[in-house]
Amino acid sequence: MKMIIAIIKPFKLDDLRDALAEAGVHGLTVTEVKGFGRQKGHTELYRGAEYRVDFLPKLKLEIAVSDEQVDAVVETIQQVANTGKIGDGKIFVLELSESIRIRTGERGSDAL
């Protein structure tokens, strides 16, 4: 099993959720986060004063999948979240050692 963590632009969530459902993903966790990378933020005007916004709003998706689903899910995220502009995000794939469904006690891939 693997844990896929993707950082994406917020407006891509609905399209990505639909595409992941078609790819066989049955659940995911979404967290609103802020961060920066090469995009480096931008400046904005508020009541006549200019200020720098270093941390940009992003969404963090956490998706637990079986080993067989990893390539399809990663490719789906890459295709749907890509705008071709800086700040599209990142994908991280981590080893997931155990998964347990609280309600039934199922373990491993059965719990996904």
Image (tube, rainbow, N blue to C red):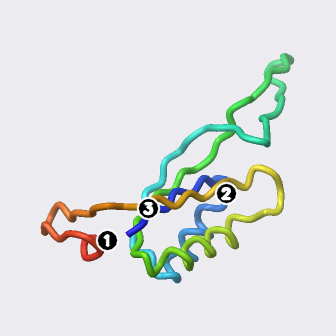
Dots 3, 2 in contact, CB < 8 A: no
Tell me how far mark 3 sits from mark 2, CA to CA. Answer: 23 Å
**Residue type at the position of mark 1:** Leu
Residue at (84% x, 16% y) in the render: 49
Q: Earlier in the sequence, mark 3 or mark 2?
A: 3
Q: Residues within 10 Å of mark 1 (few under 14, many from 20)?
A: some
The image shows residue 75 at horizontal and vertical percentages of 63, 75
The N terminus, quarter of image: bottom left
Q: Earlier in the sequence, mark 3 or mark 1?
A: 3
Left or right: residue 65 versus residue 70 is: left
Determine which residue is flagged by label 3.
3
The image shows residue 108 at horizontal and vertical percentages of 26, 70
Q: Residues within 10 Å of mark 2 (few under 14, many from 20)?
A: few
Q: Secondary structure at mark 1?
A: loop
**Residue type at the position of mark 3:** Met
Tell me how far mark 2 sits from mark 1, CA to CA. Answer: 26 Å
Determine which residue is flagged by label 1.
112
Determine which residue is flagged by label 2.
11
**Residue type at the position of mark 2:** Phe
Residue at (83% x, 56% y) in the render: 85
Q: Quadrant of residue 56?
A: top right
